[in-house]
Amino acid sequence: MSKIKVQPTETLFGVTVSGQETTTQPTPGPWKLVSWTDGASWTIEGAQGRLLANVTGQGQAENTANARLIAKAPELLALVKRMAAITTTFGIDRREPRLPRDARALLAELEGRDRP
């Protein structure tokens, strides 16, 4: 989730907005992976087939790996949120002392915040 702050009235990307803070949420999952007919490129789609991303230009194996990772973004975000909540509440195994901090830092980045 990203927060965008604007002046009292400002045009951003061709859209005039009022001077309030706006919070943007990612497109809800699940996201669907759709192969192009060339077999080397992929489209990531949201609900009702809405185009979210095209993955192309790196070669078949790398495109496939990248597309799979992108398509799982909503589930990865949910998992990081759960990890951050659990490790904050219950602590973590001594073998992974940085996990709570790392999970909160990654979550802050994913949500567009400066710090956890």
Image (cartoon, rainbow, N blue to C red):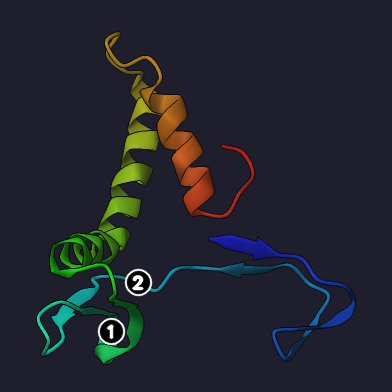
Name the spot of residue 52 as percent of width and height, x first.
36, 80
* Mark 2 residue type: Pro
Q: Looking at the rendered structure, which numbered label has been put on residue 28?
A: 2
Residue 63's quadrant in the figure?
bottom left
Q: Residue at x 40, y 19 (%)?
A: 98
Which residue position holds label 1?
47
* Mark 1 residue type: Ala
Q: Residue at x 39, y 74 (%)?
A: 27
Name the spot of residue 28 as percent of width and height, x first.
35, 71
- Residue extending furthest toward the top: 94
In the image, residue 37 above or below residue 29: below
Residue 116's quadrant in the figure?
top right
**For the residues bearing labels 2 and 1, Cβ distance under 8 angstroms:** yes
Disc 1, SS: helix
Name the spot of residue 59 as percent of width and height, x first.
20, 68
Residue 19's quadrant in the figure?
bottom right
